[in-house]
Amino acid sequence: MSMTNISRRGLLGAFATTMVAAAPTMSNAFGILRGAGDIRRIRMYSGRTGESLDTVYWIEGDYIKEALKEINHFMRDWRNDQVVNIDARTIDIAAASHRLMDVSEPYMMLSGYRSPATNAMLRSRSKGVAKNSLHMKGMAADLRLKSRSVNQMYQAATACHAGGVGRYPRSNFVHMDCGQIRTWNG
């Protein structure tokens, strides 16, 4: 079925009346949601901007360009409104982790893209900010859930076997990125 002549809004309307269950299989980074059904969805909100995001961004093997643009804007550097293309693999990891935890609550996004200036400013204030952070490449997100512990989020993200996962219990968030597979405690 070709999706090129159907609008995103039309697709969302078509799926609004159906219950979507996407149980990911985590074989590797490229197949993180293979067998997950026909759609992928991400739900987040930002306490910094007050914005919310609830979007289907992948249908039947294809990423939806309009949805990715919406995600790029949502995950922008809120300090200076700079927008970059967020690596879709990062979104896949977050979506798969969310699905593994079986929650309906959206993620609270603490940090998505960071401009080099923002990263340098944060680095000057904290030892936990990497000089060459993947946030500056649109490849990382710092996320929190009220209904799940940092450890539960960390376990779900590491189960994806698809990138870097950092656990920050004192700050109550988990870092997820689509870089090399590695884990750490902040």
Image (tube, helix red, strand yellow):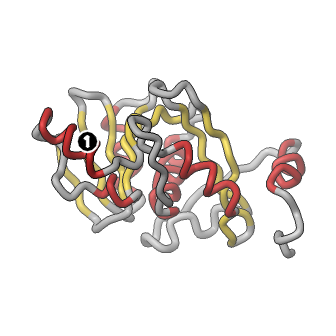
Q: Quadrant of the N terminus?
A: bottom right
Q: Position of residue 141 (x, y in %)?
A: 39, 47
SS at mark 1? strand
Residue 31 percent across, percent down from the top left: 52, 72
Q: As shown in the figure, which amino acid type bears the numbered disc 1?
A: Arg
Q: Residue at x 27, y 51 (%)?
A: 116
Quadrant housing residue 110: top left
Q: Is residue 170 left or right of residue 62?
A: left
Residue 51 falls left or right of residue 111: right
**Residue 78 or residue 101, whichever sits in front:** 78
> Are there few (<14), some (14-19), or many (20+) residues within 10 Å of tag 1?
many
Q: Position of residue 138 (x, y in %)?
A: 41, 57
Number of marks in picture: 1
Residue 179 x, y percent position in the rendering: 32, 65
Q: Nearer the viewer, residue 97 or 81?
A: 81
Residue in the picture at 85% in, 75% down:
2
- Residue shown at 83% from the left, 71% from the top: 4
Does residue 174 lie above or below 97 as drawn? above
- Residue under numbered circle 1: 167
- Position of the C terminus, as image quadrant, is top left
* Res 146 quadrant in image: top left
- Is 140 in front, or is 113? 113
